[in-house]
């Protein structure tokens, strides 16, 4: 039986009232663990600019970075739908360049779908990418690539003007053909309005409970990234303290010579050793 999660599964899950789970992944080992745990969708997010590359925003991430990480994640994903972010300036300058770069994520990166940030202003670009048979997920609300326009990573949609813009963005994305929308960092009452305004599944991050699914940056929810922790992140584990403890024990065992032990060591016949000169 084919139990792969596809873009059709997004709509089916919404129609059946089953919540969609999504997490970011950037490498093979982590993607394999998340896929085996039963996650519906893996996002190769451009958040890798912060949590993998150590920058203070996602702006410097390139299309080649995304392809590199996408290859690793798609190699691991047996069931999850792999969605890959289009980085800053990879879809902004022309429709031709946008379609070309979305195509590279699919052909070279093995992506099953792509995600891009922006609403009304990007509707035509999205329409053309979808026309090229590339499934697109939209991303509105707090769009991290626009951090300098927003003046920081801030909740969006609290004023009437902003809130109306986000509702208009959601409608424009649906009309352009997205299969789902990521809605980031908006008040939960606004999420409810948007959920009524469009039929496509809404995947929230900091958008409250009235969404069709949730997404988080895995490094945040696993307690592996402490440089910046938004209010909407819940830490489901504290892996950094587990890793630190393991590394301290490793250093100690190297020093007191309890590692490597017999079971980690290769043997050779004494006869061979004795014949060496
Ligand atoms: O890049 C990313 O990880 C994202 C999530 C925050 C949704 O876009």
Image: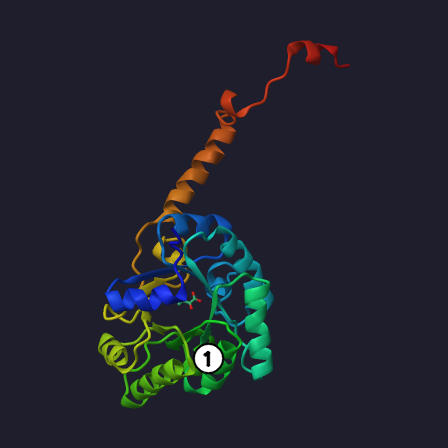
Q: Quadrant of residue 22?
A: bottom left
* Residue where numbered disc 1 is placed: 148
Q: For mark 1, give the secondary structure.
A: helix
Coloring applied to the structure: rainbow
The answer to whether residue 91 is left or right of residue 238 is right
Q: Position of residue 105 (x, y in %)?
A: 55, 67
Q: Residue at x 40, y 66 (%)?
A: 7
Q: Position of residue 130 (x, y in %)?
A: 48, 77
Q: Residue furthest right?
A: 277
The residue closer to the viewer here, 9 or 204, is 9
- Label 1: how many residues lie within 10 Å, few (<14), some (14-19) or many (20+)? few
The residue closer to the viewer here, 62 or 177, is 177
Q: Residue at x 75, y 14 (%)?
A: 276
Q: Residue at x 34, y 84 (%)?
A: 171
The answer to whether residue 8 is left or right of residue 15 is right
The answer to whether residue 124 is left or right of residue 198 is right
Q: Quadrant of the C terminus?
A: top right
The residue closer to the viewer here, 215 or 54, is 215
Q: Is residue 93 visible?
A: no
* Quarter of image, ligand 1: bottom left
Q: Quadrant of residue 146?
A: bottom left
Q: Position of residue 127 (x, y in %)?
A: 47, 82
Q: Is residue 49 visible?
A: yes
Q: Position of residue 91 (x, y in %)?
A: 54, 78
Answer above or below: position of 273 versus 40: above
């Amino acid at each position: 039986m084919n139990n792969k999660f596809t873009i059709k599964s997004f709509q089916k899950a919404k129609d059946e009232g089953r919540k969609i789970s999504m997490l970011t992944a950037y490498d093979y080992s982590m993607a394999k663990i998340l896929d085996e745990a039963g996650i519906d969708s893996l996002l190769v997010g451009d958040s890798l600019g912060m949590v993998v590359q150590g920058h203070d925003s996602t702006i410097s991430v390139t299309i080649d970075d995304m392809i590199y990480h996408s290859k690793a994640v798609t190699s691991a994903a047996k069931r999850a739908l792999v969605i890959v972010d289009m980085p800053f300036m990879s879809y902004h300058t022309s429709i031709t360049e946008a379609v070309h770069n979305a195509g590279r994520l699919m052909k070279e990166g093995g992506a099953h779908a792509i995600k891009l940030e922006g609403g009304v202003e990007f509707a035509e670009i999205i329409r053309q990418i979808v026309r090229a048979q590339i499934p697109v997920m939209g991303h509105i609300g707090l769009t991290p690539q626009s951090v300098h326009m927003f003046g920081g990573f801030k909740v969006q949609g609290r004023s009437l003007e902003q809130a109306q813009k986000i509702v208009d963005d959601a409608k424009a994305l649906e009309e352009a053909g997205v299969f789902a929308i990521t809605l980031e960092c908006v008040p939960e009452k606004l999420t409810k309005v948007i959920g009524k305004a469009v039929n496509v599944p809404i995947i929230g991050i900091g958008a409250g409970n009235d969404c069709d699914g949730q997404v988080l940056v895995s490094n945040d929810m696993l307690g592996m990234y402490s440089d910046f922790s938004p209010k909407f992140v819940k830490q489901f584990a504290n892996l950094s303290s587990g890793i630190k403890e393991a590394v301290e024990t490793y250093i100690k065992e190297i020093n007191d010579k309890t590692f490597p032990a017999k079971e980690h060591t290769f043997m050779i016949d004494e006869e061979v050793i004795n014949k060496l000169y």
